[in-house]
Amino acid sequence: MSNGTAALHLASLVLLKETDKVLTTPNSFLATSNAILYAKAKPIFVDIYENGNIDLDLCEEYLKNDNTIKAIYVVHFSGGNPVNQDKLKYLKEKYNIKILEDCAHSLGASFNDIKAGSCTNSDISIFSFHPVKNMTTGEGGAITTNSKEIYEKLLSLRNHGMVKTKDMRPWEYEMQELGFNYRITDIQSTLGLSQLKKLNKFY
Ligand SMILES: Cc1ncc(COP(=O)(O)O)c(C=O)c1O
């Protein structure tokens, strides 16, 4: 992805419907909650624990009282400080909600051997490779998911909603939905791949 904000934008278009309510943290860069607004959904800010992460116990209080809440956007705040994955799993299963992990600060971090961004207990994770992050490509981002359906939808949205099939001539394509140019460049990707090899040294 071209940057973490673009990743959040597409993730929100895939995960959310207009008017969905989404629990999220006030302790983040503005892009996390803006992405909820891009999808015309409604962010609800939930207080944080002392470690800076969203208070998942408080999230449960909200979920108990309002079944129009459809998702939680968590941010693993600051490098090496991921949210509690056991609680994420519990909330996802009990309340049947979608979960997005914003891993912009946490590439390489893990909670009880569960890597931030592995989507073990979430639908989608996003990363940013902005220069202030613990690994950079100049500007850049990425999305991870374990769902083939989400992956294919994201590939289309990232590339103008354009589709090419085998029976088409080389110059032909169809635009089947309204998409964006949110591609990262090959040059940035090459830098990122070389940086990834050094990730363990950055921690
Ligand atoms: C928590 C968080 N989410 C998302 C972003 C957005 O990433 P980008 O700057 O690559 O658009 C940032 C970047 O600063 C961030 O800190």
Image (cartoon, rainbow, N blue to C red):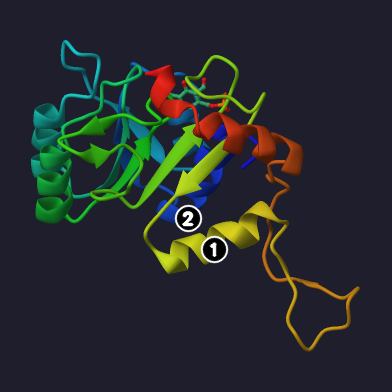
Residue type marked 1? Lys
Res. 12 in view:
no
User: Dot 2 corresponds to which residue?
Assistant: 14
Q: Point out residue 167 in the picture as x, y percentages from the top left corner.
A: 78, 89
Whether disc 2's CB lies below 8 Å from ligand 1 is answered no
- Give the amino acid at mark 2: Val
Q: As rendered, which of 178 and 170 lies closer to the eye?
A: 170
Q: Residue furthest top?
A: 50
Q: Residue at x 36, y 31 (%)?
A: 108
Relative to 146, say whether 53 is above or below: above
- Quadrant of the rendered image containing residue 42: top left
Give above or below for 181 relative to 156. above
Residue 62: assigned label? none
Q: Going 32% across and 42% down the picture, which residue do you hit?
A: 21
Can you identify the residue that label 1 sits on? 153
156, 195: nearer the viewer: 195
Q: Is residue 122 left or right of residue 135?
A: left
Q: Quadrant of the C terminus?
A: top left
Q: Is residue 7 left or right of residue 51?
A: right
Mark 2, other Cα within 10 Å: few <14 / some 14–19 / many ≥20 = some
Cβ atoms at labels 2 and 1 below 8 Å apart: yes
Quadrant of residue 28 within the rendered picture: top left
Residue 7: % across, % down: 54, 41
Residue 194 picture location, percent across and down: 60, 33
Location of residue 138 by image quarter: top right
- In the image, residue 181 lies at what x, y percent? 73, 47
Within 10 Å of the Cα at label 1, are there few (<14), some (14-19), or many (20+) other Cα atoms? some
For marks 2 and 1 on the same chain, the one whose residue lies earlier in the sequence: 2
Disc 2 versus disc 1: nearer the observer: 1
Q: Residue at x 32, y 39 (%)?
A: 22
- Disc 2 on helix, strand or loop? helix
**Under 8 Å from ligand 1: the CB of mark 1?**
no
